[in-house]
Image (tube, helix red, strand yellow):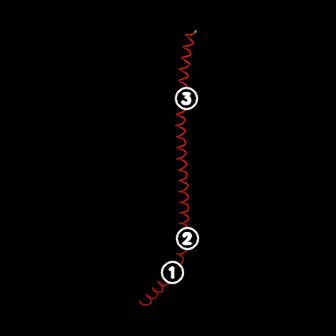
Amino acid sequence: MNKYMKVGNCEVRRVATSVDTLTENLAGILRSVSALTVECLEVYRDAVCKTCDAVDSNIKSMYQLMAKCEELSKSMKPIYKLSEQIKGIKRLLDLFENAMNI
């Protein structure tokens, strides 16, 4: 029975060593996966932050553009009045020209 115990004991040690090796490999793989997960989340966070900054900047630019368009629209109001005056002058010139041709 002593011989069987030695063989059994050796087999138990071999299995224990194999389990230890597998456990160490698994721990290394899990550390690697965790590191990759952290890196992916950091990249995602940075992308979200940059996207938010870009959207904020675009919104500010849009409001500035709207304000400039409103200013332009207000500054164009006198041009419409001037256009009517020019049309009136042209009409008078046409009348004058017709009167001269008679």
- Residue 102 visible in image: no
Q: Residue at x 56, y 64 (%)?
A: 63
Amino acid type assigned to the residue bearing label 1 in the image: Leu
Q: Left of 69 or right of it: where is 101?
A: left
Q: Position of residue 88 (x, y in %)?
A: 50, 83
Instruction: Give the CA distance from mark 3 to mark 1.
Output: 88 Å
Q: Which residue is mark 1?
A: 82
Q: Which residue is mark 2?
A: 70
Q: Give the secondary structure at mark 2.
A: helix
Q: Residue at x 55, y 70 (%)?
A: 70
Amino acid type assigned to the residue bearing label 2 in the image: Glu
Determine whether 71 is above or below 14 in the image.
below
Determine whether 4 is above or below 60 in the image.
above
The quarter of the picture where residue 41 lies is top right
Q: Which residue is mark 3?
A: 23
Instruction: Give the CA distance from mark 1 to mark 2.
Output: 20 Å
Instruction: Give the CA distance from mark 2 to mark 3.
Output: 70 Å
